[in-house]
Amino acid sequence: QKGAGVVLAGSAVAKSWPSGDDAGMHASPVRWSHPAVVAATCLWLGRIPWAPGTWGAAAGLGLALAIERVALAAGEASSATALAVELGLVVLVNAAGIPICTRAAAALGASKDPGAVNLDEATSMPLALFVIPLGARGWTVMLLAFLLFRFFDILKPFPCRQLERLPAGCGIMADDWGAAVWSGCCLAVALQV
Protein backbone atom coordinates (compact mmCIF):
# COMPACT_ATOMS: atom_id res chain seq x y z
CA GLN A 1 0.00 0.00 0.00
CA LYS A 2 1.44 3.35 -1.00
CA GLY A 3 1.69 6.30 1.49
CA ALA A 4 -1.05 7.78 3.64
CA GLY A 5 -1.51 11.19 5.28
CA VAL A 6 0.81 14.02 6.29
CA VAL A 7 2.13 14.71 9.78
CA LEU A 8 4.25 17.56 11.06
CA ALA A 9 7.61 16.56 12.48
CA GLY A 10 9.45 19.58 13.81
CA SER A 11 9.72 22.11 11.01
CA ALA A 12 9.71 19.48 8.26
CA VAL A 13 6.66 17.86 6.72
CA ALA A 14 6.86 14.07 6.51
CA LYS A 15 4.67 11.23 5.35
CA SER A 16 2.97 9.01 7.86
CA TRP A 17 3.45 5.44 6.70
CA PRO A 18 0.94 2.67 7.38
CA SER A 19 3.14 -0.36 6.75
CA GLY A 20 5.71 -1.93 9.04
CA ASP A 21 8.35 -1.63 6.28
CA ASP A 22 8.09 2.14 6.37
CA ALA A 23 7.68 2.56 10.12
CA GLY A 24 11.34 3.46 10.68
CA MET A 25 11.33 6.44 8.34
CA HIS A 26 11.94 9.92 9.74
CA ALA A 27 11.41 13.40 8.37
CA SER A 28 15.15 14.00 8.05
CA PRO A 29 15.93 16.62 5.40
CA VAL A 30 19.10 14.65 4.63
CA ARG A 31 17.06 11.62 3.58
CA TRP A 32 14.58 13.61 1.49
CA SER A 33 17.40 15.52 -0.20
CA HIS A 34 19.38 12.36 -1.03
CA PRO A 35 19.79 12.32 -4.86
CA ALA A 36 18.32 8.81 -5.16
CA VAL A 37 15.29 9.85 -3.09
CA VAL A 38 14.76 12.97 -5.20
CA ALA A 39 14.89 10.83 -8.36
CA ALA A 40 12.85 7.92 -6.97
CA THR A 41 10.09 10.27 -5.80
CA CYS A 42 9.95 11.94 -9.23
CA LEU A 43 11.30 15.23 -7.91
CA TRP A 44 9.28 14.80 -4.70
CA LEU A 45 5.92 14.10 -6.39
CA GLY A 46 5.92 11.00 -4.18
CA ARG A 47 5.69 13.24 -1.14
CA ILE A 48 2.18 14.33 -2.13
CA PRO A 49 0.19 12.61 0.63
CA TRP A 50 -2.59 11.13 -1.49
CA ALA A 51 -2.07 8.63 -4.30
CA PRO A 52 1.70 9.00 -4.87
CA GLY A 53 1.61 6.14 -7.40
CA THR A 54 -0.96 8.03 -9.45
CA TRP A 55 1.28 11.11 -9.49
CA GLY A 56 4.19 8.91 -10.57
CA ALA A 57 2.12 7.41 -13.39
CA ALA A 58 1.10 10.92 -14.47
CA ALA A 59 4.79 11.87 -14.60
CA GLY A 60 5.26 8.70 -16.65
CA LEU A 61 2.93 10.07 -19.32
CA GLY A 62 5.31 13.00 -19.73
CA LEU A 63 8.24 10.59 -19.86
CA ALA A 64 6.43 8.50 -22.50
CA LEU A 65 5.83 11.60 -24.62
CA ALA A 66 9.48 12.64 -24.31
CA ILE A 67 10.68 9.16 -25.30
CA GLU A 68 8.25 9.11 -28.23
CA ARG A 69 9.51 12.48 -29.51
CA VAL A 70 13.17 11.46 -29.23
CA ALA A 71 12.45 8.14 -30.98
CA LEU A 72 10.51 9.82 -33.79
CA ALA A 73 13.24 12.43 -34.29
CA ALA A 74 15.98 9.77 -34.29
CA GLY A 75 14.09 7.53 -36.67
CA GLU A 76 12.86 10.04 -39.25
CA ALA A 77 14.24 7.91 -42.08
CA SER A 78 13.17 4.54 -40.72
CA SER A 79 10.38 3.33 -38.46
CA ALA A 80 12.60 0.42 -37.42
CA THR A 81 15.20 2.90 -36.14
CA ALA A 82 12.52 4.82 -34.24
CA LEU A 83 11.25 1.59 -32.68
CA ALA A 84 14.80 0.55 -31.70
CA VAL A 85 15.47 3.96 -30.12
CA GLU A 86 12.19 3.81 -28.20
CA LEU A 87 12.90 0.29 -26.96
CA GLY A 88 16.43 1.27 -25.94
CA LEU A 89 15.22 4.30 -23.98
CA VAL A 90 12.42 2.35 -22.25
CA VAL A 91 14.89 -0.36 -21.22
CA LEU A 92 17.43 2.26 -20.10
CA VAL A 93 15.06 4.22 -17.83
CA ASN A 94 13.66 1.03 -16.32
CA ALA A 95 17.10 -0.50 -15.75
CA ALA A 96 18.31 2.76 -14.17
CA GLY A 97 15.31 2.65 -11.84
CA ILE A 98 16.51 -0.52 -10.10
CA PRO A 99 19.61 0.93 -8.37
CA ILE A 100 17.91 4.30 -7.86
CA CYS A 101 14.97 2.69 -6.05
CA THR A 102 17.32 0.42 -4.08
CA ARG A 103 19.29 3.42 -2.83
CA ALA A 104 16.17 5.49 -2.15
CA ALA A 105 14.52 2.74 -0.10
CA ALA A 106 17.72 2.39 1.95
CA ALA A 107 17.96 6.18 2.44
CA LEU A 108 14.34 6.23 3.60
CA GLY A 109 14.97 3.33 5.98
CA ALA A 110 12.49 0.99 4.29
CA SER A 111 13.14 -2.67 3.49
CA LYS A 112 10.40 -2.86 0.85
CA ASP A 113 8.64 -0.39 -1.49
CA PRO A 114 8.26 2.96 0.33
CA GLY A 115 5.03 4.74 -0.52
CA ALA A 116 6.84 7.88 -1.62
CA VAL A 117 8.91 6.02 -4.23
CA ASN A 118 7.00 6.41 -7.50
CA LEU A 119 9.74 6.25 -10.11
CA ASP A 120 8.58 2.67 -10.71
CA GLU A 121 5.19 3.93 -11.93
CA ALA A 122 6.76 6.71 -14.00
CA THR A 123 9.18 4.47 -15.87
CA SER A 124 6.59 1.75 -16.42
CA MET A 125 4.11 4.00 -18.25
CA PRO A 126 6.24 4.12 -21.43
CA LEU A 127 6.42 0.31 -21.26
CA ALA A 128 2.60 0.13 -21.14
CA LEU A 129 2.41 2.32 -24.25
CA PHE A 130 5.04 0.38 -26.20
CA VAL A 131 2.38 -1.70 -28.01
CA ILE A 132 0.89 1.44 -29.57
CA PRO A 133 2.70 2.60 -32.72
CA LEU A 134 4.77 5.77 -32.42
CA GLY A 135 2.78 8.77 -33.56
CA ALA A 136 -0.55 7.05 -32.84
CA ARG A 137 -0.65 7.86 -29.13
CA GLY A 138 -3.31 10.54 -28.87
CA TRP A 139 -4.72 11.78 -25.58
CA THR A 140 -7.50 9.18 -25.59
CA VAL A 141 -4.96 6.37 -25.86
CA MET A 142 -2.76 8.00 -23.21
CA LEU A 143 -5.71 8.37 -20.81
CA LEU A 144 -6.78 4.76 -21.39
CA ALA A 145 -3.20 3.55 -20.82
CA PHE A 146 -3.00 5.60 -17.62
CA LEU A 147 -6.29 4.23 -16.25
CA LEU A 148 -5.45 0.63 -17.17
CA PHE A 149 -1.99 0.92 -15.65
CA ARG A 150 -3.29 2.33 -12.37
CA PHE A 151 -5.98 -0.38 -12.27
CA PHE A 152 -3.46 -3.21 -12.70
CA ASP A 153 -0.88 -1.54 -10.44
CA ILE A 154 -3.43 -1.39 -7.62
CA LEU A 155 -5.04 -4.79 -8.32
CA LYS A 156 -1.68 -6.57 -8.77
CA PRO A 157 -2.84 -9.60 -10.79
CA PHE A 158 -0.50 -12.53 -11.36
CA PRO A 159 2.49 -12.22 -11.54
CA CYS A 160 2.65 -8.62 -10.20
CA ARG A 161 2.35 -9.50 -6.51
CA GLN A 162 4.94 -12.26 -6.91
CA LEU A 163 7.33 -9.90 -8.71
CA GLU A 164 6.99 -7.46 -5.83
CA ARG A 165 8.78 -10.03 -3.65
CA LEU A 166 12.02 -9.73 -5.62
CA PRO A 167 14.82 -8.11 -3.62
CA ALA A 168 15.32 -4.35 -3.24
CA GLY A 169 14.88 -2.11 -6.29
CA CYS A 170 14.13 -5.04 -8.54
CA GLY A 171 11.00 -5.83 -6.52
CA ILE A 172 10.03 -2.16 -6.38
CA MET A 173 10.23 -1.93 -10.18
CA ALA A 174 9.13 -5.38 -11.34
CA ASP A 175 5.54 -5.36 -10.07
CA ASP A 176 4.97 -2.21 -12.13
CA TRP A 177 6.48 -3.87 -15.18
CA GLY A 178 3.87 -6.60 -14.72
CA ALA A 179 1.12 -3.98 -14.49
CA ALA A 180 2.50 -2.33 -17.63
CA VAL A 181 2.41 -5.62 -19.54
CA TRP A 182 -1.20 -6.24 -18.46
CA SER A 183 -2.06 -2.67 -19.51
CA GLY A 184 -0.31 -3.02 -22.85
CA CYS A 185 -2.15 -6.27 -23.61
CA CYS A 186 -5.49 -4.68 -22.80
CA LEU A 187 -4.62 -1.60 -24.88
CA ALA A 188 -3.66 -3.74 -27.85
CA VAL A 189 -6.93 -5.68 -27.64
CA ALA A 190 -9.06 -2.56 -27.08
CA LEU A 191 -7.58 -0.79 -30.05
CA GLN A 192 -8.17 -3.78 -32.33
CA VAL A 193 -11.89 -3.78 -31.59
Image: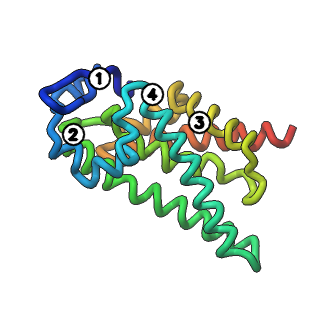
Give the residue drawn at x 16%, y 26%. Answer: 9
Whether residues under marks 3 and 1 lie with C-beta atoms below 8 angstroms apart, the answer is no
Q: Mark 1 or mark 2, which is nearer the start of the sequence?
A: 1
From this viewpoint, is residue 2 visible?
yes
Work out how far the residue at label 3 is from the one at label 1, CA to CA, in angstroms.
Answer: 26 Å
Q: Nearer the viewer, mark 3 or mark 4?
A: 4
Whether residues under marks 3 and 2 lie with C-beta atoms below 8 angstroms apart, the answer is no
Give the numbered dot on residue 6.
1
User: As rendered, which of 179 and 120 lies closer to the eye?
Assistant: 120
Mark 2: which secondary structure?
loop
Residue position marked by numbered label 3 in the rendering:
149
Work out how far the residue at label 3 is from the one at label 2, CA to CA, in angstroms.
Answer: 26 Å
Work out how far the residue at label 4 is from the one at label 2, CA to CA, in angstroms.
Answer: 18 Å
Residue 174 horizontal/vertical position (percent): 44, 44
Q: Mark 1 or mark 3, which is nearer the start of the sequence?
A: 1
Instruction: Say whether residue 112 is left or right of residue 73.
Output: left
Give the residue drawn at x 56%, y 32%. Answer: 150
Q: Nearer the viewer, mark 3 or mark 1?
A: 1
User: As rendered, which of 81 and 12 lies closer to the eye?
Assistant: 12
Q: Mark 4 or mark 3, which is nearer the start of the sequence?
A: 4
Q: Quadrant of the N terminus?
A: top left
Figure coloring: rainbow
Residue position marked by numbered label 4 in the rendering:
51
Residue 72 horizontal/vertical position (percent): 69, 68
Residue position marked by numbered label 2 in the rendering:
108
Mark 3: which secondary structure?
helix
Q: Quadrant of the C terminus?
A: top right
Question: The residue under label 3 is which amino acid type?
Answer: Phe
Give the residue drawn at x 59%, y 61%. Answer: 67
